[in-house]
Amino acid sequence: MLQELSIKNFAIIASLDVEFENGMTVLTGETGAGKSIIIDAVGLLAGGRGSQHFVRTGADKAIIQGAFVFPENGQTYHQLDQLGIDHDDGTVILQREIYRSGRNVCRINGMLVNTNTLKQLGETIVDIHGQNEHQELMQPDKHLRLLDEFGGDELLAIKSKYQSTYQDYQHLHHSMVSRNTHQKEWAQRLDMLRFQVKEIEDAQLEPDEETNLSQQRDRLMNFQKINTALQEGYLALNGDEEVTGALDLSGKAMDSLSSIADLDPAFKQLSDSLQSAYYALQDASGEISKQVDQLEWDDNKLDEIEARLDVIHQLKRKYGDSEKQILNYLARIKKELADMEAAEIDESDLDEQLDKKEQQLIKYGEQLTAERKRISVKLEKAIQSELKDLYMSKTVFQVRFKPTNDQQYFATGMDDVEFYIQPNPGEEIRPLAKIASGGELSRLMLALKTIFSKSQGVTSIIFDEVDTGVSGRVAQAIAEKISGIANESQVLCITHLPQVAAMSDHHYFIDKQVKGKRTVTHIKKLNQSDRVKELARMLAGTTVTELTLDHAKELLDMATEEKHQRA
């Protein structure tokens, strides 16, 4: 239930704080005082659509806060757990800030959430019933949802099986349509993948192969230069018959210094340095000799390398900037090819799979239809029972299943449902959307709310002027029906009917005043004496007489007696 509501800079409300209690609460006041604005604020807390036009003139933003409490293990707490929002103290604080720029900031117990999340949670908290819901009754495509709501868990379980099967069926159907529509493109893609996989695999590409081949090509293309350098280097180290090489000379220097190495540490250091230099030159000489022995000119080898590098360059131009990228691409297209070839095999029995899934869909669809028809009889009886209390005892209400085309399946099932009504005996029963008056729609929706209030689990139900178009004993019946709903859920009700206001457990008066050239809305909880005066105003209008006050007091006494009898 809604415990506290705080509104700041919202429409004509500068600042308003109000506490609510369980049971039935009515909000009354002159037209335009701001009663519906308060309900609009609650609607925004429940995820309703926001607009910068809600921000009070001269303010930067509007702030709305609401404190709610819920039954343990209810749907709201379950959803909060899924969102990871703490609710240990049993209270949930919803906050909405609407900036003049149009930006919205939503919080649940201090945690920032988006508007969709706020709306999902709000649907478990508040059910706002106003004139727009009359419009819902006037839209036949909404009637099936209302029937399913009445069906409860058993119907929803069958519906869940149907919808799961429907999704599978749609997927298979889409695959078949895609196959038939894009068969040519599919075949072209398959041929291209097969060609690319073969081309890359035939090349037997290896990582860093291009670098190694480029080095080999550079050696062959610079053969003469390399050969000359190696020969000259070897001669410089080893000498010949005429010239003593650097290796012999460094050996002699090493021998000379080693003979005096023990005489002084400095000589020892020089001797060690010469030894290191000698052995390094010796190793270099051996490596040069090895390179000279391995060096050979092969004109065919150079052609082979050039051809291989050309293959690699062609692959890089098509498939990647390096051997690694090409091989990664190969892995991807091999998987795609394998999937497509597997799908090509599966296509042979795709029609069979689709047919089996369709038969399963029909099975669950027929079960869902049968359950809906069973539930529709219960709904008809329940609504007619409620309408009897609302002085529509002669009204006939029917749930009609309209025929659909063969093999026409919807996400909601195989049914097209519409509510029909016969308001008076002897008249033709016709679609509700075409013949119901405003007063009849109010009572029909109230009958539905009475039926659903026990099963929906919503803790706060708001009626925004649902009593429009009725008076007299019908108004009294509506008042008693709303009061009955308040036994199951907290009810907030905006009304212009004194009969409805009298049945309330709590009564708030809304008025507006002009202060400093600005309109300000006030809210006041009425005591018993104030309630009598307000009911008298609602009965008489501008002139309140003693007789009117007596009538108002009588209304309150009758309402109190009615509630005592029901208790």
Image: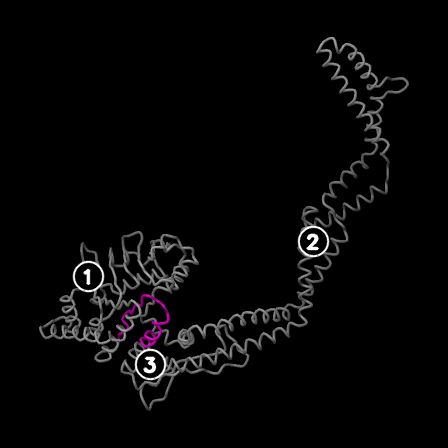
Three-letter code, disc 3:
Ala
Residue type of the residue flagged with mark 1: Lys
Separation of disc 1 and disc 2 at Cα? 76 Å
Q: Earlier in the sequence, mark 2 or mark 3?
A: 2
- State the residue lying farthest toward the left: 546
**Residue visible at 36% across and 76% down in the picture:** 137
Residue located beneath label 3 in the image: 436
Segment colored magenta: 445-468
User: In the rendered structure, which amino acid carries the disc numbered 2?
Assistant: Leu
Q: Tell me the residue that label 2 is attached to.
A: 330
Q: Residue at x 79, y 26 (%)?
A: 284
Q: Quadrant of residue 401?
A: bottom left
> Residue 90: x, y in percent?
34, 57
Horizontally, residue 201 falls left or right of residue 429, namely right
**Circle 2: is it few (<14), some (14-19), or many (20+) Cα within 10 Å?**
many
Q: Nearer the viewer, residue 394 or 3?
A: 3
Element under disc 3: loop
Q: Which residue is depicted at the point 46% across and 79% down?
A: 371
Q: Between marks 2 and 3, how big is the CA–CA gap?
A: 68 Å
* Whether residue 286 can be seen here: yes
* Disc assigned to residue 524: 1
Q: Quadrant of residue 399?
A: bottom left
Magenta stretch: residue 454 in it?
yes
Q: Residue furthest right?
A: 241
Label 1 residue SS:
strand
Outermost residue on the top side: it is: 263
